[in-house]
Image (cartoon, rainbow, N blue to C red):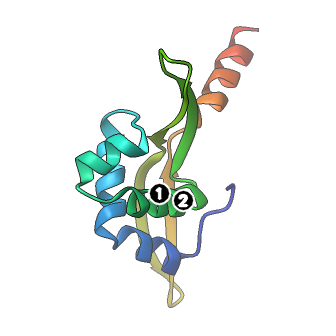
Amino acid sequence: MNEDPPPAKLFALLDDEYARRILTHLDQEPMSATELSERCDASPPTVYRRIDRLQRCGLLTEETRIDDGGNHYAVYESRFEGLAVVMEDGEFVVDLSRRADPADRLTNLWEGMR
């Protein structure tokens, strides 16, 4: 998602305890939904619903990994850096800061080497 979500949608998402827990854990290291479920003390369906909402707001990235047995699984990483809210002309204005997507960081690094 390139555009910031509407303030009401973002406020509702960040008001959710499980969404905040997920962002907090993913700020430390990338994790699978199973790991998040265990760390957040939440059911897998709850975690997957929050992951979906966080991804739609551009706050998580997903990477596919392969375990030693050849099974594929998704690992999630937080892109959330910060949120600033100001009032301008009677309306909330939200400045959502995100970390660069890992693919974008690689592209920027490559372009900087040329």
Quick check: 73 above or below 6? above
Give me the residue at 57% from left, 34% from top. Answer: 63
Crowding near the residue tagged with mark 2, few <14, some 14–19, many ≥20 C-alpha atoms within 10 Å = few
User: In this orientation, which residue lies closer to the viewer: 109 or 53?
Assistant: 53
Horizontal and vertical percent position of residue 20: 32, 60
Q: Which image quarter is the N terminus in? A: bottom right
Disc marking residue 5? none
Horizontal and vertical percent position of residue 108: 67, 24
Give me the residue at 28% from left, 59% from top. Answer: 42
Q: How many marks?
A: 2
Give me the residue at 33% from left, 46% from top. Answer: 36
| Residue 32 shown left or right of residue 21 in the figure | right
Res 4 quadrant in image? bottom right
On the image, numbered disc 1 is attached to which residue?
Answer: 48
Tell me whether circle 1 and circle 2 mark residues in contact (CB < 8 Å): yes
Horizontal and vertical percent position of residue 6: 58, 75
Res 113 quadrant in image? top right
Quick check: 46 above or below 36? below
On the image, numbered disc 2 is attached to which residue?
Answer: 52
| Residue 28 shown left or right of residue 63 in the figure | left
Q: Type of residue at label 2?
A: Asp
User: In this orientation, which residue lies closer to the viewer: 69 or 61?
Assistant: 69
